[in-house]
Image: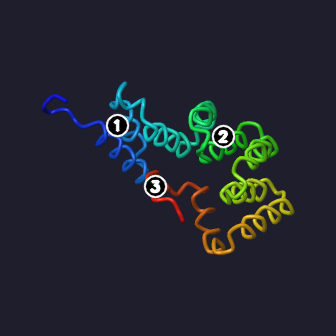
Amino acid sequence: MERGEINPLWRLWRAEGYRMIDMLEEAIGEMKALGEEGSRWLETHMVTAAIKYDERDWAGLLPLARRLRELFPETARWISYEAESLNHLVGVWEATRCVLRALPRFPKETEFRYLLHYLHRDSGNHENARYWISEALRLDPEAGNLVESAGSHRRGVAAPIFAAPRK
């Protein structure tokens, strides 16, 4: 690294920080400045997907989420991004099919049940929404107080990409 150049990791962290405070143009600028080296990092793709989510760029997020699901099949987040994109581009039932196909691989993933709850609730399918929230709470009864924060995240409140996983 030449003197005066910014460490690519700093660019990534700055991009994430800008995204968190809803400065998406600055975040995108930092991501573009990462160049070839940064494009090989999982974290770069995570921030890029989060920016597309925050921008509500569903058409851009869908192919990225599908590609990342293929590259990193152990990560459930990509399925959530794919389902959210499908919901906005095609409809709730295609999004539901996407999540249901993933459930056998992630049988204890409560995030999927919460996502299905919110997608169906927002689509007016209240009986399905009640079913999915009851399934989420059945799998993780202690998460009941997280239900509202999960809903606020879907409404656009930025969540950190590099947060420690919940135990």
Residue at the spot of label 2 = 82
64 relative position to 137: left or right? left
Residue at the spot of label 1 = 30
Identify the element where label 3 is drawn.
loop
Q: What residue is rendered at 78% in x and 55% in y?
A: 120
Residue at the spot of label 3 = 160
Q: Position of residue 43 (x, y in %)?
A: 44, 41
Q: What type is the residue that disc 2 sits on?
A: Glu
Q: Residues within 10 Å of mark 3 (few under 14, many from 20)?
A: few
Residue lying at the far left in this picture: please name it: 3
Q: Residues within 10 Å of mark 2 (few under 14, many from 20)?
A: many
Identify the element where label 1 is drawn.
helix
Q: Position of residue 126 (x, y in %)?
A: 83, 62
Q: What type is the residue that disc 3 sits on?
A: Pro
**CA separation, marks 3 and 1?**
17 Å
Q: Nearer the viewer, mark 1 or mark 2?
A: 2
Residue 86 is drawn in which quadrant?
top right
Q: What type is the residue that disc 1 sits on?
A: Glu
The mark nearer the N terminus, 1 or 2, is 1
62 relative position to 134: left or right? left
Q: Position of residue 162 (x, y in %)?
A: 43, 52
Pointer 1 with pointer 2, Cβ within 8 A: no
The mark nearer the N terminus, 2 or 3, is 2
**CA separation, marks 2 and 3?**
19 Å
Question: Toward the viewer: 92 or 37?
Answer: 37
Q: Which colour style is shown? A: rainbow
The numbered dot on residue 46 is: none
Question: Toward the viewer: 116 or 26?
Answer: 116
Question: Toward the viewer: 31 or 1?
Answer: 1
Q: What residue is rendered at 60% in x and 31% in y?
A: 67
Q: Residues within 10 Å of mark 1 (few under 14, many from 20)?
A: many
